[in-house]
Amino acid sequence: MLITEVILENFMSYEYARIPFKSGVNVICGPNGAGKSSVLLGISIALGQSYTERGRKLSNLIRWGKDQARVTIVLDNSRQNGKRPARRFDKDQIFLTRTLRKDGKYWFELDNRAATKKGVERLLAKFNVDPDNLLIIMHQNMTEQFTVLPPQEKLSTVEAAVGLESYRKNVLQANKKLSRMLSEENSVGKLLESAEQTLTYWREQYDRYQQKKQLQIKRRFLERELAWAEVSRRESIINDLKTQHRTGESKLEQLEDKSKQLEMMLTGLHSKLQTSKNEWQKLFEERLEMEKEKTRTEVLASSETQALEEVRQLVETNNGKVGDCIALVERLETTMSDHNPRDYSNMLNEIKRSYKDIENLWAQRFNEKSENLKLQMATYNEQLEKTDKHLLEIRIKAEQATNDIEQLTSQIIESKIESALLEYKRQNIEKNLKKLQRELKAKTEENQEALYRAEKTGYLISSTRNSIAILDEIRLTDGYLAALGDVSEDIERMYESYSRLYLDLKERAQKVAENREKALEEVNARMEAWSKTIQDLLNEVSYQYQKILSQAHAVGEVHLTGLRDIEAAGLEVLVGFKGAQPVPLDAYTQSGGERSMATMSFLLALQQHVKSPFRAVDEYDVHLDPKNRETITNLLIDSVQNLSSQYIIITPSQITFAERQVHIVTVQNIEGSSRVRDVA
């Protein structure tokens, strides 16, 4: 027996109640809403359980209008086989109290002294009580909850209830130890691998150190070769500069000779140009005189031609007038023919002859004048032809003189340009010669310094390579040396140190492997012990489960799943009603009454193996028909009577227990307050 009495103060519907309990079966009955479940809830709260069926917070369990509630359970600590369950308390009764407040605070007390939840858990462990195990305390609807638990949780719940947790813990501890060994082996293996890699690294570093020394020797040789190659290069540069200087001086002399020749040629060209200009000037003046003479002749010819034209016009005019006179005379002759024709005719003839004589005279004079003018014009034309011919000759000579002048001018210009270019080249050569002299002086001084540096590096080395090729090899060598820059002289010591470390780790890895084999053997041994123990237990439970189900004309069995892996292993409950084959118990396959029957049958089959002296179930029979309710009730009472344990059953009716030896507590609610009506 665990609990001798429960005291409720302002807890849920109870204002104050003291409920005694006895060993064996204790039945709490009463109508719905009377406060039956509140008693079991108060017990579980006092035992440290956080399950609250009626509210989400513990403060919701305080009676309405009150500030705090207290639940006290009196634990039986009387001697059993001469020993008390809780040896720390040397008394038969232990008062365990839990106080709840509206502000959400709560605390435990053991014999009126403050206690922690851990302290309460340690105390209950002395009594083998786990209030959070639903196989120990099964509140309302937990029969349904058990059916939906995963197989793994069902198995761990059964193990906790029957006290086989130590087997699981042993296996898990062995697994943990094995995991630790595997982890250590892995770590040592990684360390060994790392040490081997490090040792390989230092071995490579030692090889690199030797390589570095060879490269350093090679670099010193290359430095000496470079120094003497630099001296050779600078001497070559100096020789080239001297050659360039001599070449420049030679070119300068050639330019000066050419300049003198060009100057003499320019003097001759200028003399020829002046002669040509004088000749052209003379021709120009002669042509000018000829042009003037031609102009005068042309003017005279024009004047004679004009005079001849004027005479011709005068003759024509006079001839016209004489004709008019003759015509007039003829008319007079006609008019006056009637008067004295003879006298007039003579006179008129005389007049005609006069006019004829005049006309002939004018014609004679015109002809004479015309002949004279023609002779003069011929003379002028001949003179003009001679003048034009002479002018043509002068123009040809002038054009030739002009061409000579232009050609000489072009030659003079080209000669002057060439002279200017020669002067420009001469200045450039003189400038380059001065620059070469300065550079030659500087290079000579630099060569002296290079020679001094080369002599410091060592004796003369005759190299067929130039400085660039040597520098390229030095850069390549420097690159190799830079890659070996982290190599130090401590490599040999480090190599020996890591060799010893590698051997130590190898020995340690061998030892860890041996420990891992031992841990694996321990895991297998503990796993075998757990497997055999749990299998033997479930075989017995399955046998009892089948016997109990047979009374309800049902079949079933209990077996393990996933036995090879303890963390994956689970408990599967099978049941079949009305001739059906057993199927897994779940929330969908069976009816509510069938699930209740199967669950209670399993609990009853497990009872003799449960270690806790206290067990409770609330309204297990709510879905059972009267026959099955009576069957389960009788089996429950029979299973507990042979055990030194305490069972609390909550049911709305006590009819089922009417003729059995059980402790019945009846509660009812009067005006909103639950009270214990009678105890039988």
Image (spheres, rainbow, N blue to C red):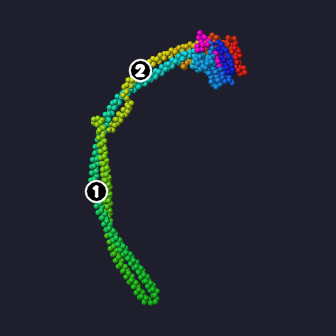
Magenta residues, start to end: 71-91
Assess whether residue 542 is covered by the magenta stretch: no
Q: Badge 2 is on which residue? A: 504
Q: Badge 1 is on which residue? A: 263
Q: Nearer the viewer, residue 614 or 418?
A: 614
**Which type of secondary structure does the marked residue at label 2 adopt?**
helix
Q: Residue at x 43, y 88 (%)?
A: 344
Q: Residue furthest right?
A: 671
The percent position of residue 608, horizontal first and vertical second, equals 60, 12
Crowd class of label 2 (few under 14; some 14 to 19; many from 20; radius 10 Å): few
Identify residue type, mark 2. Answer: Asp
Above or below — where is 678 with respect to 416? above
Residue 573 appears anywhere in the view = no
Identify residue type, mark 1. Answer: Glu
Q: Nearer the viewer, residue 402 or 648?
A: 648
Q: Residue at x 31, y 64 (%)?
A: 280
The percent position of residue 490, horizontal first and vertical second, equals 37, 27
Q: Quadrant of the C terminus?
A: top right
Q: Nearer the viewer, residue 585 or 603?
A: 603
